[in-house]
Image (cartoon, coloured by chain):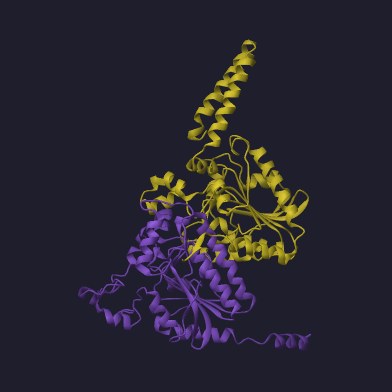
Amino acid sequence: MALERLFRRNKPTRKEDDTSPAGLWLKCDNCHAQIYRKDLVANLHVCPECGFHHRMPVGARIELLADEGTFERWSGGIKPLDPLEFEDTQAYTERIEKAQKKSDNPDAIVTGAALLAGQPIGLVLMDFSFMAGSMGSVVGEEIARAAERAAAENRSLVVVTASGGARMQEGALSLMQMAKTTVALSALAEKRLPYVAVLTDPTTGGVTASFATLGDVIFAEPGALISFAGPRVIQQTIRQDLPEGFQRSEFLLQKGMVDDVVVRRELKARVAAVLRLLTAGLPEKGVEALHAATV
Amino acid sequence: MPLPFEQPIEDLAAKIRDMRAYATEQDIDLEHEIDALQGRLDRLMRDTYDNLTRWQRVQVARAPGRPTGLDYLQKAFDDFTELHGDRTLGDDPAIVAGLATLGGTSVVVIVQQKGRDTKENIYRNFGMSHPSGYRKAMRMFDMADRFRLPVVTLIDTPGAYPGLAAEEQGQAWVIAESIRRMSELQVPALSVVIGEGGSGGALAIGVANRVLILENAIYSVISPESCAAILWRDAGEAERAAEALKLTSRDLIALGVVDRVIDEPLGGAHNSPDAAIDLVKQALVEELAQLTHLSGPQLRQSRYDRFRALGRFEAVA
């Protein structure tokens, strides 16, 4: 997949579906330590040696965030078309078919209902292993539907992003998904339902420049690349080296762009706390009474 | 300077000019010959412009001499008062904003401005905004809502600027926020893509009730050059990328991304800027008249519905 080349430096060395004996041991991308695969998985895909957060498959992410047995899938009812009849070195239809075979999902997104520490949520998970998590019509539509359905069912929304941005193969229609997902979020705002965005490695381009950064609260996983323009594009533009840690979570925390950098083993508890606090505002009547008393 | 594919047109036009000059100089009547050549020129222009490839339209959309945002502000609008600054970081010259009247109606107007020469291009950062520009746009959205002024935006940017400071100041964050704020406006909003609609940097001020595009303008998720660099690993394949991306006005109306194409004078807006500006003005006045009777919530809802419906997919069997 072409877009993945842009993120090669971050590409995990393990393979999700690798069950061969050679797949038993992996090398950490960061400290290069040999890790027993089971240990890495048991440690939430975080290197037990150095704490480096490797990319996490969607299934594991559901286990991490949803209370056991509570996840009920919403997505999967729609699949992509090829409205532009797009062909580069490979036809878009072929790329889609390959990705679908690998993932069992029609596109780079899984959504559903769940309980998170007992609280009802709509859960949206982007799948970077599917065409770099790129957002075309299906990804945009599933996110919009999830936001609207969560609002209709009085659920908070939790979105875990991982995406190279808008999908080039659907052209301007992909661009329009930025607006579509954004307008759909207003359904939550109108009902005062929280939206927590969890930005993971990598989150770039049109996804960062739309729903990903519109969370009422934005958490980022350690070391995640989070950007509008990718590091290479910027390097080509300014023709100088980028500062160490540029566009990584910790850098963005320092710049005031995210609420906190949260390690994976604490993620569920931190999201739960925020949801609890944000859904415990004064009742409407109480607010009115308060106003009446002070006027 | 003619565009490469315009050279035969330019050659023929030069021939007519020469013949005219010769006729005047020698005081002879060459009207018949000149008329014949003029007829050939018209046919050649029509042939050329009716059959431009997508890549050629990209060149027209970017052509020097094509009217820029400021040209429209001066000629399509009246009483323009520029309002500077985002009240936080500074004033971004790549986005010009202010108050004006359009056909007698007071409006807030926001335009993306490329330079008309090298010096201005550098000053305007080639029409590529920093976060400050989008913050200024958002300030204008607020003002529009407060005073119930319709919003008109003119889109012409290669994209939001991909630089160090822009990233540090949250380029993605302000684009997302600008999309949201514009979508929530309780007043009519109109956008016209007048040249280059470059990705999120264009969409940030393009969430309008009606999105118009000039015939030879383009609107794309990524520039053909960048797309080629990623998918073909060769920016030189931009021509193929432009074809694949379906980024012309005709493509976009078929996809539902834009609502109306404004025809350009024969030979493109860069060859007849004033006529093009007039056509845009007429279209804007017409479109605005269609929206002014709607309530704030209706306008917001129609914007929601418009963008919510975009995309193509099918049910899983």
Q: Is residue B141 left or right of residue B40?
A: right
Q: Quadrant of residue A41?
A: bottom left
Colour assigned to chain B in the rendering is yellow
As drawn, the residue found furthest toward the left would be A21
Instruction: State the residue in front, A145 or B231.
Output: A145
* Image vertical order of residue B4 relative to residue B204, above or below: above
Q: Is residue B169 visible?
A: no
Q: Is residue A129 visible?
A: yes
Q: Is residue B289 left or right of residue B242?
A: right
Q: Quadrant of residue A294?
A: bottom right
Residue A125 image position (x, y, % from top left): 45, 73
As drawn, the residue found furthest toward the front would be B317
Colour assigned to chain A in the rendering is purple
Q: Is residue A76 left or right of residue B185?
A: left
Residue at 65% across, 66% down: B184
* Image vertical order of residue A178 relative to residue B156, above or below: below
Residue B25 image position (x, y, % from top left): 62, 13
* Image vertical order of residue A249 relative to residue B129, above or below: below
Q: Quadrant of residue B145?
A: bottom right
How many marks do you count on the picture? 0
Residue B298 image position (x, y, % from top left): 71, 64
Residue B23 image position (x, y, % from top left): 62, 14
Instruction: State the residue in front, B132 or B314.
Output: B314
